[in-house]
Amino acid sequence: MKTILCFGDSNTWGYNPSNQQRFGPDERWTGVLRNQLGAGFRIIEEGLNGRTTVWDDPIEGFKNGMNYLIPCIESHKPFDLITIMLGTNDLKCRFSVSAFDIAESVGVLARHVLQSTVGPDETSPAILLMAPPPLARLGDYDEMFEGGTEKSQRFGSYYQTKALELGCEFLDTSEFIQSSDLDGIHFEQEEHRKLGEAVARKISDIVT
């Protein structure tokens, strides 16, 4: 059986922008992925609301993805592939970082995985870097993410460059989905379905 870890934020956790609850297990993109790949794959969901790449959140706390990544992969190993879809929360103006630096921060996480021995036979697992889609109409989140919409439109280009540099697989999610106008950040159920199917196709090409 192949094991896949999905490491991300609220859009991996399955935050529903219409009611602020969590989508059901088969509605989340990770659940769609599991159903698409079938019985030969085990999907481990590691989504956390508000998770950043490498930044300590002075308001919400305990959101630093780098701090949790190593204990996470050590406790769940071995993996055949790890997906990383982070960066949206880094757009909060409290962090004051550019799209370029956010992609660099995703690269820091990827390097930790590449230097690990949590893959088969104590190798490093394959990595799929996933660029989040651009922000949509923010509404109540407008001030929190001030300036983030323009930055988010550069994610695809910067993440692809970082993936090529590190030898990782890459998926630009904006080619398949968009953020919801209900809050500008999260994915509606249909987008979860489309993303899960797109990731399943990509993983099928990587992991055999």
Image: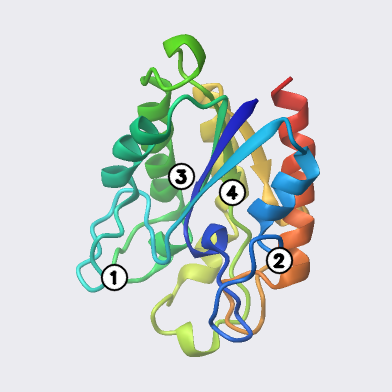
Residue shown at the point (43%, 75%) measured from the top left: 145
Q: Which residue is mark 3?
A: 103
Please name the residue that numbered disc 4 is placed on.
Answer: 131
Q: Amino acid at mark 1?
A: Arg
Q: Is residue 107 left or right of residue 30?
A: left
* Residue drawn at x 56%, y 34% as measured from the top left: 161
**In the rendered structure, which disc, 1 or 4, sits on the residue that comes first in sequence?**
1
Q: Which mark is residue 94?
A: 1
Tell me if residue 154 comes above or below residue 206 in the rendering: below
The Cα–Cα distance between marks 1 and 2, rounded to whole angstroms, is 24 Å
Dot 4 amino acid type: Ala
Seen from the viewer's position, the closer of residues 192 and 138 is 192
Query: Marks 3 and 2: which is nearer the front?
Result: 2
- Whichever of labels 2 and 4 marks the residue nearer the N terminus, that label is 4
- Image quadrant holding the C terminus, namely top right
How far apart are the alpha carbons under marks 3 and 1? 17 Å
Q: Tag 1, which secondary structure?
A: loop
The numbered mark, 3 or 1, whose residue comes first in the sequence reads 1
Dot 2 corresponds to which residue?
A: 178
